[in-house]
């Protein structure tokens, strides 16, 4: 029997720990765009979709009116430095991170 590892999701919210809205308003799209090349098949895979979609590991969204980026823990397995970049971005900007 093959065990499949279930990855956790982390929600980086566009709110600081003091409750202020993070700026610029397109921060989530910028962060997810920077991570768009990290995909399950790897950063060097080609194809039409490569340059026009977000990575399934880092997805911008809006939850309850708050801009967020959903970061899948699988990114850590694929590219630890990309994972560190995203998590350090949240920490450095005092953003709230929730685990699901």
Image (cartoon, helix red, strand yellow):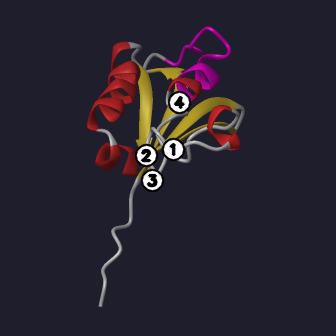
Q: Are marks 2 and 1 in contact (CB under 8 Å)?
A: yes
Whichever of callouts 3 and 1 sits on the residue coming sooner in the sequence is 1
Give SS at disc 3. Answer: loop
Q: Nearer the viewer, residue 96 or 28?
A: 28
Label drawn at residue 82: none
Marks 4 and 1, how far apart in space?
30 Å
Label drawn at residue 45: 1
Residue 47 horizontal/vertical position (percent) = 64, 44
Residue 23 visible in the current orientation: yes
Q: Which residue is mark 3?
A: 100
Residue at the image position 70 percent from the left and 41 percent from the top: 48
Whichever of callouts 2 and 4 sits on the residue coming sooner in the sequence is 4
Residue 46 horizontal/vertical position (percent) = 57, 42
- Does 97 sit left or right of 79 as displayed? right
Disc 3 vs disc 2: which is toward the camera? 2
Magenta stretch in the rendered image? 19-32
Splitting the image into 4 quarters, where does residue 32 fall?
top right
Give SS at disc 2. Answer: loop
Residue at the image position 43 percent from the left and 41 percent from the top: 98
Marks 3 and 4, how far apart in space?
13 Å
Residue at the image position 60 percent from the left and 25 percent from the top: 28
Q: Nearer the viewer, residue 93 or 39?
A: 39
Label drawn at residue 42: 2
Marks 3 and 2, how far apart in space?
25 Å
- Does 46 sit left or right of 4 as displayed? right
Residue at the image position 62 percent from the left and 8 percent from the top: 24
Label drawn at residue 13: 4
Disc 2 vs disc 1: which is toward the camera? 1
Whichever of callouts 4 and 1 sits on the residue coming sooner in the sequence is 4
Give SS at disc 1. Answer: loop
């Amino acid at each position: 029997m093959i065990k499949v590892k279930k990855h956790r999701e982390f929600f980086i919210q566009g709110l600081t720990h003091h409750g202020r809205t993070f700026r610029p308003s397109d921060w989530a799209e910028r962060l997810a765009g920077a991570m768009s090349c990290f995909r399950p098949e790897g950063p060097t895979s080609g194809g039409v979709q490569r340059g026009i979609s977000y990575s399934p590991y880092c997805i911008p969204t809006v939850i309850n009116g708050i801009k967020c980026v959903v970061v899948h823990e699988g990114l850590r397995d694929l590219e630890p430095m990309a994972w560190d970049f995203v998590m350090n971005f949240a920490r450095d900007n005092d953003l709230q991170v929730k685990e699901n």
